[in-house]
Image (cartoon, rainbow, N blue to C red):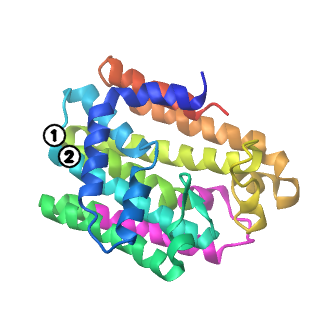
Amino acid sequence: MTFEEKYADIRQLAKDEIEFIEKFMVQNVKTREPLNSHIINFLNAPSKRIRPLLSILFYKSLYGNISDEKLKALASVELIHSASLIHDDIIDESDTRRGLKTVACEFGNKLGVICGDYLLSVAMKIVTELGSVELLKNFSNTLNKMCVGEINQNFDRFKISTIEEYIEKSKNKTAYLFETAMLTPFLTEVSYNEQASDFGLNVGIAFQIRDDLMNLTSSDSSKPVRNDITEGIYNSAVIYAGSPDNYVNGLEKTRDLLNNYIKTAYANIEKLPQNVYKKGLENFLELLGND
């Protein structure tokens, strides 16, 4: 089975909840045409929904069911992720995303920036209406860290940092949004707060390391390869090698780094009840470790 087929099996465990999230996201997009239809098509385009999926599986492994209110909060996580993709496409000058023209390609960079900001505003409006100060605080802090991560990455282009700095950047850019997704259903169930938080951070860091690794090694012609190095964004392979010219010398240590975070994520879910939802989380971690 391919990665996509194995992942589809895992996603089936939260099929109804993911469908609720996707419908709720679209319902809250209300702006002018033709931009409105473009945004809705983008949100409706095939997407893995990894962040809400992991959160739902973790929660269902403990409680069996998850409320609509919690799913609405997870929809906000996906809206933030979608907004970040729209902004990334402007920075990367990308023409397509999820098989569609990017907002910037269709409407220009100015409207692309505003569109990403609009989705962020929709996400925060939903969170505010849910009435949880802790939830609002968590989302606000995560947005701040995501921006800091992108700002720092821009200023650190063509600089070889330390592994510690690379991990911190990975947290800001990626892992804190994973953590927010994991924490979202648990803000009123504090007994699993730390466990969910740690799992989110470790999976998020592993996800970023894997993404960076794929950028250097992927044979998928539909994705840019080694463009990070060209743009001066040096990941762990370059750091371990000590130079962008011989990054291949750092690939093995990068895979070890990835596996260490996956191993820690396994430990974070070790005490969850044995059921299909925990198995789904384990299967996802197994997929994350496969090239």
Q: Quadrant of residue 157?
A: bottom right
Counting from the top left corner in percent of width and height, residue 244 is at 82, 60
Q: Is residue 274 magenta?
A: no
The single residue placed furthest to the front in the displayed view is 34
Could you tell me residue 136's position as x and y percent? 22, 63
User: Residue at horizontal 46%, vertical 45%?
Assistant: 47
Q: Whole-percent x and y of residue 18?
A: 32, 40
- Residue 188 at least partly seen: no
Q: Is 159 placed left or right of 107 in the picture?
A: right
Residue at the image position 65 percent from the left and 55 percent from the top: 163
Q: Position of residue 61 (x, y in %)?
A: 28, 26
Main SS category, magenta section: helix
Looking at the picture, tell me which residue is in the foreground, 140 or 126. 126
In the rendered structure, the answer to whether residue 97 lies left or right of residue 35 reads right
In the figure, residue 242 lies in which quadrant? Answer: bottom right
Give me the disc on residue 67.
1
Q: Is residue 177 above or below residue 39?
A: above
Report which residue position mark 2 lands on.
70
Local packing at callout 2 (Cα closer than 10 Å; few below 14, some 14-19, many 20+) is: some
Residue 54 is tagged as none
Q: Is residue 25 left or right of residue 84?
A: left
Is residue 166 covered in magenta?
A: yes
C-alpha span from label 1 to label 2: 5 Å
Looking at the rendered image, the quarter that the C terminus falls into is top right
Q: Which residues are magenta?
A: 139-168
Q: Nearer the viewer, residue 195 or 216?
A: 216
In the figure, residue 228 lies in which quadrant?
bottom right
104 displayed left or right of 156: left
Q: Residues within 10 Å of mark 1 (few under 14, many from 20)?
A: few
Q: Secondary structure at mark 1?
A: loop
